[in-house]
Amino acid sequence: MSLSTIGQILDEGYFANIDFEAQSSWWRELPLEPFEIAGIPIRNRYLLAPMCGVSNLPYRILARAEGAALVSTEMVSSTELAKGRKRSFELMEFLPVEKPVMVQISGTEGDVMLKAALMVQEYGATILNLNCGCPVKKVIKGGSGSAMLRNPEVLRSILQQLRPNLEMPLTVKMRAGWDEQNVNALEVAQMCEDCGVDALMLHPRTRDQFYEGNADWDLIGQVKEAVSIPVIGNGDIFSARDAHEMLEHTRCDGIMIGRHAIGNPWIFRQCILEEIGRPMTSSAFRLPEPFPSPEERRQAILTHFDYFCAYLGQWQALNSLRKQFLIYLKDEPGFDLFRKRLALIRSREDLADAVGCALQPGG
Ligand SMILES: Cc1cc2nc3c(=O)[nH]c(=O)nc-3n(C[C@H](O)[C@H](O)[C@H](O)COP(=O)(O)O)c2cc1C
């Protein structure tokens, strides 16, 4: 496939009829603290983390409407993208309304990464991100993801190849280091800055930790001190309060939310409301309530499903979203019943019915 074929799978007609601007207008006009990445304005400090199987086009649109100022695709293999694989194109695909949007690529071979990066640039993404954090065996065994931190010289040579050949902002997302004995985020961050990287995203756990233990927020503060490019902190933000604590504790430029945004696009809204404070909820702006009503949650689940159907079709939507539906509904009275019915859901009607039951008091 070639770049020009992107969008053939997507039902663009469906998306063309949705007023996305109106959906996000509630937060765009608010006096939120912005920052910039290589001159690109990022309207607030709350970003959606790249997540395989989650931060795809349908969910990114929901997150954006709820206030995420920068969204990211999930990781796209540079090798697969450079080969023009359909699946990579699906992963890279975004709608103009998502902008600013970051596309994340992984890989280890400079030439291949450059080819993929140029495709991302030509396709029109706002920011390119290199994955130096993925801990998964399949990814690190080829030397990419967090394995790059074990071999920063490979990363350096990739950056040296990419930087002079790319016009778009170049960013790196990384972990603290490979293991407890090799925490090198500070050195790698400085090396990235020297190589012309425009911003860093740091999840301060080592590869060995996967998701165990706590993210070391102090390390985010140290990296922020050590470089002059924007630093985005990430890891263990489970509420709007956590987001603001990370911002205050580390002085980082922005924060990125991963796991707690799954089935919970409202966390971005909550971060925004926390920033402006409740008194502002009066007449000046028409603001949403921080926590969605059952009806709003029902609508969000169905909208997420509808967007996914228009993105890759109903069969894929049902397969890909089942786990996320469970997370949306995990605190609901009818959760157990919903879980039992989940495997039987075959259509939008089935889904609407099961969600409606799950949200009713008494399940
Ligand atoms: C299901 C899942 C998929 C992920 N996929 C990616 C990915 O494709 N690229 C990436 O850089 N990080 C990925 N991550 C890591 C997150 O971006 C983030 O760094 C991590 O979850 C820590 O943030 P959190 O504590 O807010 O979840 C993934 C995490 C999860 C839970």
Image (cartoon, rainbow, N blue to C red):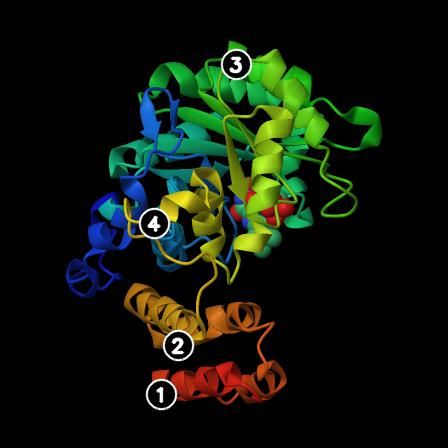
Please report whichever mark, 3 or 1, sits nearer to the chain's N-terminal start.
3
Please report whichever mark, 2 or 1, sits nearer to the chain's N-terminal start.
2
Amino acid type indicated by mark 1? Glu
Contact (Cβ within 8 Å) of mark 4 with mark 2: no
Q: Which one is closest to the eye, mark 4 or mark 2?
A: 4
| Ligand 1 under 8 Å from disc 2 Cβ | no
Q: CA distance from mark 4 to mark 1?
A: 38 Å
Q: Which residue is mark 2?
A: 315
Q: Which mark is residue 349?
A: 1
Q: Which residue is mark 4?
A: 282
Position of residue 267 measured from the top left corner of the image (x, y, whole percent): 50, 52
Contact (Cβ within 8 Å) of mark 3 with mark 1: no
Query: Is residue 29 shown left or right of residue 179?
Result: left
Q: Is residue 254 depicted above or below 189 in this figure?
A: below
| Residue at x-position 50% and y-position 45% | 50
Q: Which residue is mark 3?
A: 193
Please report whichever mark, 3 or 4, sits nearer to the chain's N-terminal start.
3
Residue farthest top in this picture: 194
Please report whichever mark, 4 or 2, sits nearer to the chain's N-terminal start.
4
| Ligand 1 under 8 Å from disc 4 Cβ | no
Contact (Cβ within 8 Å) of mark 4 with mark 1: no
Query: Is residue 310 shown left or right of residue 321?
Result: left
Q: CA distance from mark 3 to mark 1?
A: 52 Å
